[in-house]
Image (cartoon, coloured by chain):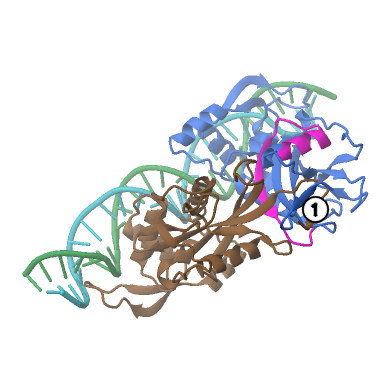
Chain colours: A brown, B blue, C green, D cyan
Amino acid sequence: MPYTYEHPHPAVTVDCVVFGYDDSDLKVLLIQRAAAPFKWKWALPGGFVRIDEGLEDAARRELREETGLTQLYLEQLYSFGEPKRDPRERVISVAYYALVALADHALRAASDADNVGWFPVTDPPPLAFDHESIVEVALRRLKGKVRYEPIGFELLTRKFTLSELQRLYETILEQALDKRNFRKKLLSMDLLVDTGEIQQDVAHRAARLYGFDEKRYRQLKRAGFNFEL
Amino acid sequence: MPYTYEHPHPAVTVDCVVFGYDDSDLKVLLIQRAAAPFKWKWALPGGFVRIDEGLEDAARRELREETGLTQLYLEQLYSFGEPKRDPRERVISVAYYALVALADHALRAASDADNVGWFPVTDPPPLAFDHESIVEVALRRLKGKVRYEPIGFELLTRKFTLSELQRLYETILEQALDKRNFRKKLLSMDLLVDTGEIQQDVAHRAARLYGFDEKRYRQLKRAGFNFEL
DNA sequence: TCAAAAGTGTTAACCATACACCCATGC
DNA sequence: GCATGGGTGTATGGTTAACACTTTTGA
């Protein structure tokens, strides 16, 4: 028992709400716990922050170790610290949320052989700890933020059609959008570049593929532009 | 040395960025540290989270103990966890920000006789730890949030004139607003109630005093209304 | 030739902006 | 009576919202 302190210290964890999108469905990434407490229950990927490790570093490390995901959009969400949220000891969890295009990122089996899987955000299984409320907060944040920051693109593959983009927004915001107005608005922002390519292997007229011009966005933003809707 | 753990645990603190507004000036509340590290330096009010205490509870307790402030608008801001941010040991700080009307809340001398004072947010003294960046994040959050949530009212006394409200927004947003348009917009939202009273002791025509109708806001919000600008 | 989704303009309503003068009060 | 801020309306331009049909392609 080598670590002693004059005052009691809580443990600190990170937990990640990873949103994935594929084919009109918003999903959340869960792992099945192989150890107590809540053994066999589904939970958010995450774990203890190492003593010399930054919070975001910890979140990225846990994601890599438990799910194989790297290089994703990651942002701090909120910190959860109800005294009784973990039955073992006082644990404060700094939650992050991440966005990822399902088609682009294959899951790797977790290093400790836990099950990993995608679940519909609207109807996830019962979760360990207070993870259900963490998912709820993350979803609220995503819904809010997607309207005034171009983070939706993080959920799509690098090349996408306008219809895919529209379906994504409709899914997240849970409201129908007008096709012509949506296209007008998005194209007028000057953030999408026509790749010149079109969809392959579709059973109808193939749509143009666009890309999100990150560099252009930063430029416009510096000049006072604000992404909206 | 009674508290021992199998793995090293960081310490967890809360720090509060309290914004105050009075007479066209946005201020931040600081206390002067009476103990090392950073002895005599100014810092955000805050302290260690007790082992059985919620995070927001800890923030409110520290504010009460160190500044005498109670009953204020308080919201979690962000968690700061750079490994070296505290020279003593690993400390993760969950930052909160609070809004308060200077005129309504007198400061009490801190229990441990630290100095307490209000400083202009634009030009604060050098701060201990990474508190300058915490203030910066809080200010950014305030500037963003004030546009789409009616939190500005928390910085004003319960009764206020439209000019005071406008000056508040101009101060926070750092931009001039048109008087007639501002009034039209705010009054049309149906969130302000005319108290029937007018300013006293002013050397010019006395302005009507309005109040913010919190209950009405919740009502409208439930019905899909969104406060903006 | 049918099914499925892509792509495309116009109009009307609404909202945001710009703008300047008279009023009430205290000194 | 003058200085100070309170209070008020309109016209214009721009933005958003509503709306339906033709095109392309593969099966």
x, y percent for residue B7: 71, 58
Query: Element type at marker 1?
Result: strand
Image quarter in which the N terminus of chain A is found: bottom right
**As drawn, is B172 to the left or to the right of A111?**
right
Give the residue at mark 1.
A4
The residue sitting at 73% across, 51% down in the picture is: B93
Quadrant in the picture for residue B115? top right
Count of numbered labels shown in the rendering: 1
Which kind of residue does numbered mark 1 sit on? Thr
Quadrant in the picture for residue C7? bottom left
Residue B91 sits above or below residue D8 on the image: below
Front residue of B170 and A137: A137
Front residue of B172 and B203: B172
The residue sitting at 45% across, 62% down in the picture is: A115
Q: Is residue B175 visible?
A: no
In magenta segment, residue B138: no
In magenta segment, residue B80: yes
Q: Which residues are magenta?
A: B58-85
**As drawn, is A42 to the left or to the right of A62?**
left
Quadrant in the picture for residue A157? bottom left
x, y percent for residue B166: 65, 39
**As drawn, is A43 to the left or to the right of A6?**
left
Q: Residue furthest toward the bottom?
A: A196
Q: Is residue B65 visible?
A: yes
